[in-house]
Image (cartoon, grey):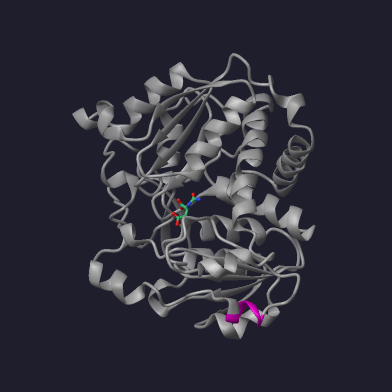
């Protein structure tokens, strides 16, 4: 039987009022950071990064240090017992017994949920393969609130790698919960948004359309969310080469946009935003990266201090003989995990990675 903790695996684990409270707290921390400087004294946060990271890892670490807490962890699993073949369950079991909160980024889709099943402290998903990245979404929500003053009645363009871009998936899950948001999905056909996220938008009654160029969307947008083509997630280098550099935001394209529109990007940028755009006051991506530290301070405080309120980790049915068909799903490598699926008409949905399996 799992103990109850405030894990953050997916934005859908909590209500919109919970997110609004975290954003409000982050804004208060931005106004008076000194009043929070010892709120986590004596607490330990573990950061386990199985994949590269600059902003997410360091902003989490800076956040905990600014709250008076301490950090342990690794950013290169080959320096840990993972290199000796230790499974995820055992690593998480041990590290969560040393710490009060555990932040993990991993290559496998669904790994954060798998980690939470084994953990003795709250687990925060800092990116699970090409699946989800909820703490980037909190950063994005705080940025929208600070820059535009609202999270509703927005026309948002999302451009680039909508297939593998985990930040896009989590952001759409969140923004679709606020009223009257409209989405323009700008991508090539092969990097279009996965159908399970399109179904979330439809189920929540959100207007969205798919287009192939930035130009046709630009004049309507309140926010343009640029993303990197996720080279490391492609099956072949040839396919990556076909997709890279299709979209490039330039000062000329910025002239098509509204005066009060903003450009966001989770970063790192490769070639998709020309450096000249940085000087445009509407380029909000460096301010967005700083917001990440404040919102993670608010998240750490809420996770440690609030009564557990996240949804149960597994709610579906265990099918021992059915395997998830997603090659990148955590159940492919962590063989002890229960094969848990939600049933939706004629399909089973993997509870870890959201892959759909036709019965
Ligand atoms: C993103 C990620 O890791 O998914 N970066 C981040 O966390 N700020 C985006 C990316 O790597 O392209």
Looking at the image, which residue sits at the far bottom? 216
Residue 255 part of the magenta segment: yes
Q: Viewer-proximal residue, 228 or 251?
A: 251
Total marks placed: 0
Q: Quadrant of residue 35?
A: top right
Which residue is at 64% across, 59% downward? 284
Tell me where residue 213 appears, x and y as whole percent. Answer: 52, 83
Q: In this image, 228 relative to 287: left or right?
A: left
Camera-nearest residue between 327 and 31 = 31
Left or right for 20, reference 290: right
State whether the magenta stretch is mostly helix, strand or loop.
helix
Task: Give above or below for 59 relative to 229.
Answer: above
Q: Residue 73 versus residue 206: which sits nearer the camera?
A: 73
Classify residue 331 as left or right of residue 280: left
Task: Identify the residue at horizontal 63%, vertical 77% (top origin).
Answer: 254
Q: Which residue is located at x 34 percent, y 29 percent?
A: 89
Q: Seen in the image, is 303 located left or right of residue 28?
A: left
Is 24 located above or below residue 164 in the figure?
above
Residue 343 in percent (x, y) is at: 46, 55
Magenta residues?
252-256
Q: Is the residue 9 above or below the residue 72 in the image?
A: below
Up-down relation of residue 77 to residue 319 (above or below): above
Is any part of residue 276 visible from this angle? yes
Residue 223: name its quadrant.
Answer: bottom right
Residue 315 in sight here: no
Spot occupied by residue 87 in the image (x, y as percentages of width and height): 28, 31
Q: Is residue 62 magenta?
A: no
The C terminus lies in quadrant = bottom left
In the rendered image, residue 52, in percent from the top left (x then y), is placed at 37, 45
> For the view shown, which residue lies furthest in the left direction?
84
């Amino acid at each position: 039987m799992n103990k109850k903790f405030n894990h953050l695996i997916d934005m859908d684990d909590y209500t919109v009022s919970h997110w609004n409270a975290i954003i409000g707290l982050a804004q208060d921390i931005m106004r008076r950071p000194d009043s929070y400087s010892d709120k986590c004294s004596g607490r330990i946060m573990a950061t386990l990064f199985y994949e590269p990271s600059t902003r997410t890892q360091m902003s989490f670490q800076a956040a905990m240090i600014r709250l008076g807490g301490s950090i342990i962890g690794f950013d290169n699993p080959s320096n840990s017992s993972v290199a000796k073949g230790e499974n995820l369950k055992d690593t998480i079991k041990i590290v969560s017994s040393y710490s009060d909160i555990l932040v993990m980024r991993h290559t496998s889709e669904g790994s954060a949920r798998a980690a939470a099943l084994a953990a003795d402290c709250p687990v925060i998903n800092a990116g699970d393969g090409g699946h989800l990245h909820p703490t980037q979404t909190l950063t994005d929500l705080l940025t929208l609130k600070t820059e535009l003053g609202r999270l509703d009645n927005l026309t948002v363009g999302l451009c680039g790698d909508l297939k593998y871009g985990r930040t896009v998936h989590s952001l759409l899950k969140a923004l679709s919960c606020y009223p009257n948001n409209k989405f323009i999905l700008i991508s090539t056909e092969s990097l279009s948004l996965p159908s399970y996220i399109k179904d979330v938008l439809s189920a929540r009654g959100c207007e969205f359309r798919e287009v192939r160029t930035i130009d046709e969307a630009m004049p309507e947008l309140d926010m343009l969310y640029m993303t990197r083509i996720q080279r490391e997630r492609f099956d072949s280098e040839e396919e990556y080469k076909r997709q890279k550099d299709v979209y490039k935001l330039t000062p000329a394209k910025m002239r098509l946009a509204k005066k009060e529109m903003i450009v966001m990007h989770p970063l790192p940028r490769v070639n998709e935003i020309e450096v000249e755009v940085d000087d445009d006051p509407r380029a909000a991506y460096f301010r967005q990266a700083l917001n990440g530290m404040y919102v993670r301070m608010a998240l750490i405080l809420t996770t440690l201090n609030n009564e557990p309120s996240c949804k149960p980790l597994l709610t579906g049915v265990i099918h021992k003989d059915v395997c998830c068909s997603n090659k990148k799903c955590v159940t492919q490598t962590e063989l002890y995990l229960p094969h848990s699926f939600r049933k939706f008409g004629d399909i089973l949905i993997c509870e870890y990675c959201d892959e759909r399996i036709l019965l």
